[in-house]
Amino acid sequence: MYSEARWYLARATTDESSRMSQTAPKRLWIRRLAWLLGIWAASIAVLALAAYLLRLVMNAVGMTA
């Protein structure tokens, strides 16, 4: 059915994908964690910026703590 060259190519492709699938879940997990931490850090930074701007506006109109 397959010529010898096509058989070796099919086997090499299968071996390559099986090796990649063994390391992919670990890399995927690390990538997801990095995205989670990045989004969390960005949300904290935006919240801090909003609080600072609100404080500036409140001080500008005479409201002090």
Image (tube, rainbow, N blue to C red):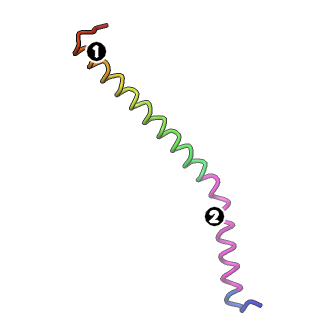
Query: Is tag 1's residue or tag 2's residue first in the polypeptide sequence?
Result: 2
Q: Which mark is residue 14?
A: none
Residue 1 in the image, given as x and y percentages of width and height: 77, 90
Decide whether residue 23 is among the magenta residues. Answer: yes
Judge whether 46 appears above or below 27 on screen.
Answer: above
Along the line of sight, the residue nearer the viewer: 54 or 39? 54
Element type where label 1 sits in the image: helix
- Residue interval drawn in magenta: 7-27
Q: Residue at x 35, y 26 (%)?
A: 50
Q: Which mark is residue 20?
A: 2
> Which x, y percent locates residue 11?
70, 79
Say which amino acid is labelled 2. Met
The span from disc 1 to disc 2 (Cα, nearest Å) is 56 Å
Q: Please identify the quarter of the rendering in which residue 17 is found.
A: bottom right
Residue at image location 26% in from the left, 19% down from the top: 56
Q: Residues within 10 Å of mark 2 (few under 14, many from 20)?
A: few
Q: Residue at 31% of width from left, 7% of height from top? A: 65
Q: Is residue 10 left or right of residue 34?
A: right
Magenta region includes residue 37: no
- The prevailing secondary structure element of the residues shown in magenta is helix
Q: Residue beneath label 1, please?
A: 58
Q: Secondary structure at mark 2?
A: helix
Q: Nearer the viewer, residue 24 or 54?
A: 54
Dots 1, 2 in contact, CB < 8 A: no
Which amino acid type is marked by label 1?
Met
- The residue lying at 63 percent from left, 64 percent from top is 20
